[in-house]
Image (cartoon, coloured by chain):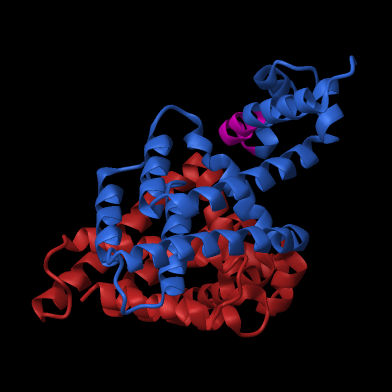
Chain colours: A blue, B red
Amino acid sequence: MPRLSAERLAARRERILDAAWACFGRYGYAGATVRRLEQATGMSRGAIFHHFGDKEMLFLALVDREARRIAVMAGRRDAVGLMREMLADAGAGDGHGGLELWWEISHRLRTEDGFRTAWATHAEAVTGAITRRLEHQRGAGRVRSDVPVRALALYLQLICEGLVSQLADVPASDELHAVLDFVTDSLR
Amino acid sequence: MPRLSAERLAARRERILDAAWACFGRYGYAGATVRRLEQATGMSRGAIFHHFGDKEMLFLALVDREARRIAVMAGRRDAVGLMREMLADAGAGDGHGGLELWWEISHRLRTEDGFRTAWATHAEAVTGAITRRLEHQRGAGRVRSDVPVRALALYLQLICEGLVSQLADVPASDELHAVLDFVTDSLR
């Protein structure tokens, strides 16, 4: 393998993660075979695993990156708006809009103690980001002030987890959008 | 095996289901081995499978009975109250208060088309029961009238699914009770 600068290595790593994310999201962990990962990334297994060791480590790197991305987004954007995008993605095309990967995460949280421990830090970062954003919005008079913001942040996360879970057995529907309208109202 | 009256057969069937429910709830599907099912029911595998064919059919009979039970309860009792009980059960003792079984149900909804189809009828029955109860409460002035009751029913189910999902990685906490307080308020 030719030598690459640190910058180009990092860029290649990101490119593998982007393609792998779509592949895991579409086929799930078990379905994202090495062959499919090769097709998705346009790289050989040797090149992929040079960067990530093995499929399990690639998956953990994806989870780590995604959790950080969500914490950043949750601090910047409206949580209900993000959920609406999730609904739209789930309804478009096949592969459940990346939900396969979330179901794998849910499954591991239930069955792997080590994963649960590693995840706790990420979960707290997301709660913290949503809480700070709600505080800011409360300051601007856009969020009700009779309920602790942290309770509202946990409430939004419950709704989001319920949505991820529900989308396994019901299609994304206008009814779910109506529920999100109600959630938006309930925060005011 | 001695002949039993239809009534005694039905009673024995129920007794097996009660014990199996606790066993699956504590150990999960894979962990509820035939040996553990024998211990839990106090019956031999021959007696158990005389009634239910095999472990898979026993599981499906459990899911069917539980879904009907929930639809009946949802029509009679306050949904948030039922969620509070779920929280209390999850926090008490080991075995996640029966949640293992719900996680198995979630997992099958994601991975088995046949199961998802069979489940849709149950899910609609629960939504219907919650909707009728909310309508009744709205008639008595206890539920807000500016949002369709069906949206509120779906909202309550989202919260409940979020709770089941969240209890996989966070312990039942006072914070979750505070969220349920807020949910109760949001319906008024």
Tell me if residue B118 comes above or below residue A29 in the rendering: below
Q: Position of residue A123 (x, y in %)?
A: 60, 61
Magenta residues?
A20-28
Front-most of B43 and B33?
Answer: B33
The reply to whether residue A11 is in sight is yes
The reply to whether residue B16 is in sight is no
Which residue is depicted at the point 89% across and 14% down? A2
What predominant SS class does the magenta segment belong to?
A: helix
Tell me if residue A168 comes above or below residue B165 in the rendering: above
Q: Position of residue B6 (x, y in %)?
A: 46, 74
Tell me if residue A23 comes above or below residue A98 in the rendering: above
Image quarter where the N terminus of chain A lies is top right
Toward which corner of the image does residue B132 lie, by quadrant? bottom left
Toward which corner of the image does residue B34 lie, by quadrant? bottom right
Q: Position of residue B81 (x, y in %)?
A: 37, 81
Which residue is depicted at the point 30% across and 64% down? A140
Q: Is residue A93 left or right of residue A128?
A: left
Image quarter where the C terminus of chain A lies is bottom left
| Residue B34 is a magenta residue | no
Front-most of B169 and A125?
Answer: A125
Toward which corner of the image does residue B182 lie, by quadrant? bottom left
Q: Position of residue B54 (x, y in %)?
A: 64, 56
Front-most of B81 and B100?
Answer: B81
Q: Is residue B136 left or right of residue A167?
A: left
Which residue is depicted at the point 64% across and 26% down? A19
Q: Is residue A114 left or right of residue B8?
A: right
| Residue A27 is a magenta residue | yes
Which residue is depicted at the point 75% across and 30% down? A10
Q: How many marks?
A: 0
Front-most of B105 and A34?
Answer: A34
